[in-house]
């Protein structure tokens, strides 16, 4: 091979990684990041659904309307409450479940499988099951409350219960995922350390706090990030269970976006809702990133 | 001999496990039990709390009146198409990230992480506009293209993790022998990470299987509906008996339950890897 050929080859070798990385990245730019930037631009226009490729630039008009619209604050509050409660309850239940089935016992494999049901059932199927259980006339919950003599509840149509009912379904879906993440982390806790703590006379709770918790904390944090981001993104079960109602009490930003766009036909306004949703999701990711960096630094010290 | 305290702890633990099993398992049990009830019980006298297998023929007849077969076929097309595309592109990206240092690597990592944070709903409207322009609205192709944006990165994380575990020496001799790098990937690396490919395939497949938001927005023809949209059309509609609705939901859920339980650890690894690398 001539020297010239070799030189060309090393030039090609530098380009080689791009032959692999460019097709997937171009794909993501075309079908994710270009649409995303168009969405951000669209929030500055008065685009309507009849002609979604045309819209007049109106600056911050949509955001001005958003700030003055009480429905926006209802939606923002619903999103925040829904996200925070899903994270808190989902993490708590997931960790408790993981600790409960961490040590071997008879039938553990079956129990583990059953505990994962909520996570494995598709969202639309989960919505149908729970809609039937919440059914006011014939649902199993109201049959039980009637037997208990406390009457029937409007699980999904009363502003008092709707968000809680949607939360229950959500927790049923996400707690098993938290459990799996924590279970994986628990395997990394050295059994000898736990034994040693116990021999030293530490009771279960102090062993947990001193030995187990530090080991699983990064995983819990990671699970919290994912659950928070999923809560901001979630559409199917909220839309199918309540459609965002009653009186907007479950209309998270994402549900509101879909409705403003395809029922209200105002794409510009819908995009403004979307921008707020994106900002929330990015904030969660940034918090996670900062905490993660700080932990890395502490560990390397 | 167990001390009373230990015995009490043990009892507490098993009670807790029992409660969790009921909370987690009951909805699925109830789905099956409802599917095997007759409707006079469901709406009138009260649902029988256990599945009545003698009503299985009734359920089969009822399901015959629901286009569940066609819906599942569409779902299968959407999920399979998305899986093939995600794995192909995910393997390329995974190999690049696993084997090369290059300019823009950090940017690639950031963009892949972003896909896991961006709400799907945010690109719904622009994709809708784009699909109108290119004639992809109301087509399964358009839907698959939209879905893959979210499943490709997860496939990439799973495959990259598996490739990282393959020692470089294995491909070294092939590279010295001037074997094209693409063939190194397809002939040497990929056969070595088959279990992870299978896991990535399951993740991508069920992302497409379960998807609802894009499908319900982009597909107008009900002959194109996947099962998720078809089943959702039962909401607020009272002609179809609940036993048939939940029977269809059960048929739709079973494959997902089986595969999720089979590869649960791999799915978790894939979903968490992306968030750590950000």
Image (spheres, coloured by chain):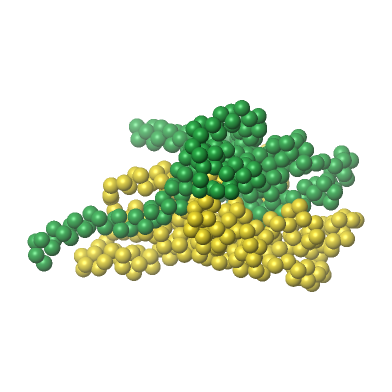
Give the percent coordinates (x, y) of residue A120: 61, 55
The residue drawn where x is 19% and y is 56% is A11
B19 up-or-down from A27: above or below: above
Determine the colour of chain B. yellow
The residue drawn where x is 87% and y is 59% is B41
Would residue A155 be found to the left or right of residue B199 on screen? right
In front here: A124 or B194? A124
Which quarter shows the C terminus of chain A? top left
Of all residues, the one furthest to the left in this rendering is A3
Q: Is residue A148 visible?
A: no
Residue A71: name its quadrant: top right
B60 up-or-down from B12: above or below: below
Which quarter shows the N terminus of chain A? bottom left
Give the percent coordinates (x, y) of residue B48: 84, 58
Chain coloured green here: A
Give the percent coordinates (x, y) of residue B50: 80, 60
Would residue B247 be found to the left or right of residue A120 on screen? right
The residue drawn where x is 44% and y is 36% is A289
The tally of labels here is 0
A143 up-or-down from B193: above or below: above
In front here: B255 or B19? B255
């Amino acid at each position: 091979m001539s020297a010239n050929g070799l030189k060309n080859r090393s030039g090609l070798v530098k380009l080689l990684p791009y032959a692999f990385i460019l097709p997937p990245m171009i794909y993501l730019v075309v079908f994710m990041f270009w649409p995303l930037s168009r969405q951000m631009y669209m929030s500055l226009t008065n685009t309507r659904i009849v002609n979604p490729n045309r819209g007049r630039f109106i600056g911050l008009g949509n955001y001005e309307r958003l700030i003055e619209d009480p429905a926006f604050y209802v939606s923002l509050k619903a999103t925040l409450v829904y996200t925070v409660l899903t994270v808190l309850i989902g993490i708590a239940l997931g960790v408790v479940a993981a600790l409960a089935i961490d040590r071997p016992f008879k039938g553990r494999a079956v129990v583990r499988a059953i505990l994962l049901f909520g996570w494995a059932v598709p969202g639309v199927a989960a919505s149908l099951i729970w809609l039937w259980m919440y059914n006011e006339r014939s649902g199993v919950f109201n049959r039980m409350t009637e037997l208990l003599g406390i009457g029937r509840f409007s699980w999904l149509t009363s502003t008092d219960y709707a968000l809680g009912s949607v939360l229950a379904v959500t927790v049923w879906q996400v707690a098993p995922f938290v459990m799996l993440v924590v279970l994986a982390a628990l395997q990394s806790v050295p059994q000898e350390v736990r034994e040693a703590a116990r021999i030293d006379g530490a009771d279960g709770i102090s062993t947990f706090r001193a030995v187990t918790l530090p080991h699983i904390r990064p995983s819990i944090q990671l699970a919290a990030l994912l659950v928070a981001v999923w809560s901001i993104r979630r559409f199917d079960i909220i839309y199918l269970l309540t459609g965002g109602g009653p009186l907007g009490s479950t209309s998270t930003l994402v549900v509101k976006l879909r409705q403003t766009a395809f029922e209200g036909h105002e794409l510009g306004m819908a995009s403004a809702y979307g921008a707020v949703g994106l900002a929330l999701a990015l904030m969660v990711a940034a918090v996670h990133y900062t905490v993660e960096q700080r932990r890395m630094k502490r560990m390397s010290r | 001999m167990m001390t009373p305290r230990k015995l009490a702890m043990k009892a507490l633990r098993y009670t807790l496990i029992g409660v969790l099993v009921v909370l987690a398992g009951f909805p699925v049990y109830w789905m099956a039990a409802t599917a095997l009830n007759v409707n006079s019980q469901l709406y009138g006298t009260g649902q029988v709390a256990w599945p009545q297998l003698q009503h299985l023929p009734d359920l089969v007849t009822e399901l015959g009146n629901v286009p569940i077969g066609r819906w599942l076929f569409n779902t299968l097309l959407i999920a399979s198409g998305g899986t093939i595309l995600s794995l192909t592109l995910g393997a390329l990206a995974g190999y690049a990230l696993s084997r090369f240092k290059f300019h823009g690597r950090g940017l690639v990592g950031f963009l892949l992480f972003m896909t896991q944070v961006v709400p799907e709903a945010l690109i719904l409207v622009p994709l809708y506009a784009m699909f109108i322009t290119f004639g992809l609205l109301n087509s399964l192709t358009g839907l698959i293209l939209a879905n893959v944006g979210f499943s490709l990165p997860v496939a990439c994380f799973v495959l990259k993790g598996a490739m990282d575990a393959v020692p470089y020496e294995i491909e070294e001799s092939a590279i010295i022998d001037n074997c094209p790098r693409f063939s190194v990937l397809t002939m040497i690396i990929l056969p070595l990470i088959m279990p992870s490919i299978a896991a990535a395939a399951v993740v991508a497949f069920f992302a497409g299987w379960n998807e609802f938001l894009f499908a319900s927005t982009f597909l107008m023809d009900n002959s194109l509906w996947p099962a998720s949209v078809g089943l959702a059309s039962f909401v607020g509609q009272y002609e179809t008996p609940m036993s048939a609705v939940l029977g269809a939901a059960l048929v739709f859920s079973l494959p997902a339950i089986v595969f999720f339980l089979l590869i649960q650890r791999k799915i978790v690894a894939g979903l968490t890897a992306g968030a750590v690398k950000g």
